[in-house]
Image (cartoon, coloured by chain):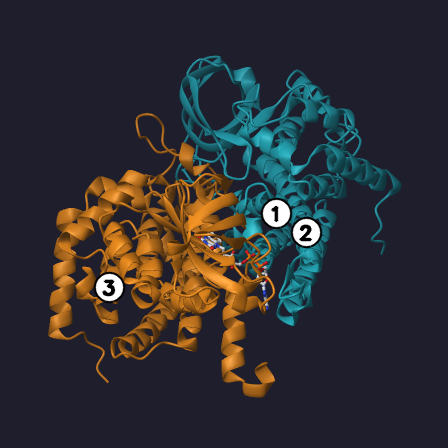
Chain colours: A orange, B cyan
Amino acid sequence: MDLSYSPEEQAFRAEVRAFLEASLTPEMADKVRQGHDTLTKEDIEHWHATLNARGWLAQNWPKEFGGAAWNAVQRHIFEEEAARANAPRIVPFGLSMLAPVLMKFGSKEQQDHYLPRILDGTDWWCQGYSEPGAGSDLASLKTKAVRDGDHYIVNGQKTWTTLGQHANWIFCLVRTDPDAKQQEGISFLLIDMDAPGIEVRPIILLDGTHEVNEVWFTDVKVPVENLVGEENKGWTYAKYLLTHERTNIAGVGFSQAGLDSVKRIAKAERANGKPLIQNPHFAARIAQVEIDLMALSTSNLRIVSKAAAGEAPGIEASMLKVKGTVIRQEINDLARRAVGPYALPFPSESVDGDNNPIGPDYAGPLAAQYFNYRKLSIFGGSNEVQRNIIAKTMMGGAGR
Amino acid sequence: MNFDLTEERQMLQDTLRRYLRDKYDTETRNTIIESDDGISAEIWAELAELGVIGALFTEEQGGFGGAGFDIAVVFEELGRAGVVEPFLDTAVLGGRLIAATGTDAQKEVVEQVITGGAHLALAHGEPVSRYDLTHVETTLTAEGDDIVLNGRKAVVVNAEAAGHLIVSARESGAVHEAEGISLVLVPADAAGLTMRGYPMLAGGRAAEVTLDDVRLPASARLGAAGQGWGPLSDTLALAHVALAAETLGAMDSATALTNEYLGTRQQFGRPIGTFQALQHRMADMLIELEQARSAVINAAGYLQSDTRTRDLNIAGARNLIARVGRLVAEESIQLHGGIAMTQEYELAHIAKRIVMTDHRFGDADYHLERFIELSAA
Ligand SMILES: Cc1cc2nc3c(=O)[nH]c(=O)nc-3n(C[C@H](O)[C@H](O)[C@H](O)COP(=O)(O)OP(=O)(O)OC[C@H]3O[C@@H](n4cnc5c(N)ncnc54)[C@H](O)[C@@H]3O)c2cc1C
């Protein structure tokens, strides 16, 4: 047992930190701090391009596809540093969801065509899995694709499509065999969002932000060469993709950055004439979550090192997901508590034309973010579904 | 012991519930929230007509209620429907404070409030006062027959709609002392008073209010010089009952919506309410909801008792409700899944109301500390 990072890993961390200091503008970091919704499409594209120029955008891709080929520990170090520096998050849909599927199951033509376009930002991908009737029970999806000569005709509706308003491509799970058993009649299709018959409608979330959408398909013609792998094998690919969706599932870097920020706020806020951080009840709340986070951080590293050694995480990923999201949500709860009555204003109004904040400059987005982050325990496989997986795996017969 | 509502209160509850069910759906409310005023003048007038405001005042004050249970009944219904109109600010914090302290001339405003013809706002909290309610830095200086106000008031709910603001200001004593706080009835258009208004996350509007040499006749004082804390804390006690009851009503809605959704939403070929993992969590919410209901009854029922008993029950109720509120808001969203995250769905607003109540006059920790102090005394 040795809890320290190797000299190479420490050097890597220094390199990442230096890069972030040199490349992340204070304006961009400030926007990230003010809440995810303040970043424009251009901001995100700009950040992707900055990373790509350094060769660090496709962190998990092998070298032959232009990736950085980082191992899990390196990715973890980057995530920690990036969260600390308030760097924008890398939009994962093309880079860490679709790309691994194309590399494993796509044709040579698909790989040659799509992968470079993901890297250079030509394409913005979104994920078309969920439907109004198919959430946790994803295999019950109804959007159908019917073969017609050298095309599929797609009809149906996807929902919760994150950043679909910016995307020009969507990867979808569609039903190609209505008679087969649920999981066996599903295919994985790549669809051009500019195709006639596609309509994107915004869904406004409870914090007033527009980050998800409904995507409607009416007789959309999709060339058969946009099928990934074999027809009716889409479920296998989707499951493979899900294992990739789970990198950074614990969100330790985000939680650490969030906790640091809560502490800074609690030092600045005053309660009964003393800094809030000296209030025994608030201090206890901070300590409690920090204790949990210290343990989670080590759990995460235990699993990350296994993954770096090539072992695929199983239920550990589910455990990290549940604990990681609960901790992140708790930290966001502390943040809104910390600012007292200044949690009440609506965030987008929290600065005036001259950029003067209503209350303390850190207060604006905190309550809205608290509500927005309720999503963490719902998406990416809800925490209930994760618990089902853990129980089924660990409890043998009794867990089924 | 009798836990039934009186006939009058039962009628009020029924009328109010029916009216809001018919008139105040999610879409209507979202339109109100997005409007410039953030309030519906029509709904305000109709609810005043139904006696909702009158019920919050005693007969002596020109109303027909005013006791803890009247306040609780009204606010539980307002909370159930997620009403964003400022009944707390205009009627309880504003109207009741003037009724308790004002001269006959000043009390004319109360009559207007009861008929729905005037809005009020309490400008008490300051940028660094947080929940520390005796912390008043705004100053009042007497100059001949005039008084002059200087300072800043933070998150003054309903300030823009109000014809008058009740401003607390320090006339003597140290910044955090109860003694020396005066109350002043300030016309919203007084020279030197400026506002920066903004909408709030859970609906309604507030403003940062700046008082820059606001000069008024000494007759603008509410009550005696430096003696404002007594009536202010009595009025805050009423407000705590109102906030607790409002949150209870909202929690009732949240659990009802969740219960219904669990019965209708199908995944894996069956209603999600058939999963025992979710049933137990629903059961826990319902258990805690009954605790909250009793806590509100305690707070309302002991409102007229001695100050210690009153405040102990209020601190207890608000602490309990802050805890249960967070549980109910978060669990209701979680058990719904994605749908509850959308602005169009009723629960989104209800959950925000529940949680944001925590930020008015004290969160769970603040009331816990108050309880500890009172209980040890
Ligand atoms: C902000 C946000 C962004 C999203 N982005 C995307 C995206 O880009 N692309 C995409 O395809 N999808 C996306 N999703 C959808 C997300 O994956 C689904 O919300 C998720 O799968 C849950 O489905 P549901 O919302 O329909 O809830 P439901 O599946 O209806 O679940 C409702 C409740 O029942 C519980 N439940 C369900 N089944 C069981 C069971 N067997 N046992 C116990 N409890 C159960 C759930 O845990 C939940 O508490 C997003 C969702 C959100 C909120």
In which quadrant of the rendered image does the N terminus of chain A lie?
bottom left
Asked whether the residues under the numbered discs 1 and 2 touch, taking CB atoms below 8 Å apart as contact, a structural biologist would say: yes
Report whether mark 3 lies on the same chain as mark 1.
no
Residue A158 in view (yes/no) = no
Find residue A86 and report its horizontal and vertical position in percent.
Answer: 27, 50
Residue shown at 43% from the left, 20% from the top: B194
| Label 3 sits on residue | A61
Find residue A63 and report its horizontal and vertical position in percent.
Answer: 17, 65
Which residue is the extreme one toward the right?
B7
Look at the numbered disc 2 and give the secondary structure of its residue.
Answer: helix
Query: Label 2: chain?
Result: B
Report whether mark 3 lies on the same chain as mark 2.
no
Total numbered labels placed on residues in the image = 3
Alpha carbons under labels 1 and 2: distance apart: 7 Å
Look at the numbered disc 3 and give the secondary structure of its residue.
Answer: loop
Q: Amino acid at mark 2?
A: Leu
Q: Is residue A330 above or below residue A338?
A: below
Taking depth in this image into account, of A39 and B82 the one nearest to the observer is A39
